[in-house]
Amino acid sequence: MTEHNPQDNDIFLEGEIVVLRQPDIEKDVLQGHWHSWFNDPVTTQYLVHGVFPVNREQQAEIVTREMADPSSLLLVVIDKATSRHIGVVCLKFINHTLRSAALSIVFGDRSVRGAPLEAVALLTKHAFDRLSLQRVYGGQHASLWQWMNSLELIGYRLDGYSQDYGIRNGETYDIANYAVTSSHFYTLQKQRDGNICTASLENLLSQKASENKTEIMKQFFSELYDG
């Protein structure tokens, strides 16, 4: 991760390929395409969104409410090479008593290889370094097991499995839960000379596991309760 340049005062967190900053309602929403991601059936295929249409004004209201919520930290993801707004990452349900928060991520532009992982790494590091949290957790549609294998590269681990969590296109789907603790994150970061994404994000991505561990977990619970 690169050093922060204080002259770029709209930048909050900076990596090698992306920067994270606070949303700009006018630029990102009212003049941008943020709302269109939640109308796109491909982007929302594995999300709870996409049930009702949303326009720019409605999206602006949603973003404004989220920014005003003290238990939420919402940041936009900008591709450094093109300055395009390509995604959003968020810590939700920030709880300073439990020292935990939930991770949320949506990318409307998935063309920048490594951008989602670096964005999550930056936000997770901030959660531990500055918010003094102890655990960041989340859940994903079980079909996104390859993304969860990517998250493992920065310390996240499978943390549970919810069968028949919801229904989409007439079929039930499962959710795989994952989490990372500050101790595990910092241990991994130290092993990598202080850079959780290593000196080469491309090399890190090449180490991603190919095994579908969510299927193993599903089988485990099926055998545990169904005999």
Image (spheres, grey):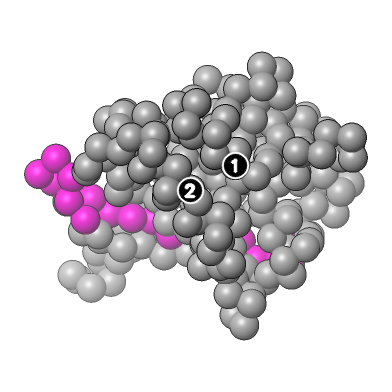
Q: Residue flagged by tag 1: what amino acid is it?
A: Pro
Work out how far the residue at label 1 is from the one at label 2, CA to CA, in angstroms. Answer: 8 Å
**What secondary structure is found at the residue carrying circle 1?**
loop
Q: Is residue 205 above or below residue 91?
A: above
Residue drawn at x 50%, y 56% as measured from the top left = 66
Of residues 187 and 64, the one drawn nearer to the viewer in this rendering: 64
- Find the magenta span and give its range: 166-185
- How many numbered markers are drawn? 2
Q: Is residue 62 above or below residue 164?
A: above
Q: Position of residue 16 (x, y in %)?
A: 77, 30
Residue drawn at x 77%, y 63% as measured from the top left = 130
Number of other residues with Cα within 10 Å of mark 2, as a class: few under 14, some 14 to 19, many 20 or more: some
Of residues 29 and 222, the one drawn nearer to the viewer in this rendering: 29
Name the dominant secondary structure of the magenta segment. Answer: strand
- Quickly name the residue at label 1: 23
**Which picture quadrant has residue 180?**
bottom right
> From the viewer's perspective, is 140 left or right of 129?
left
Is residue 177 covered in magenta?
A: yes
* Residue 63 - label: 2
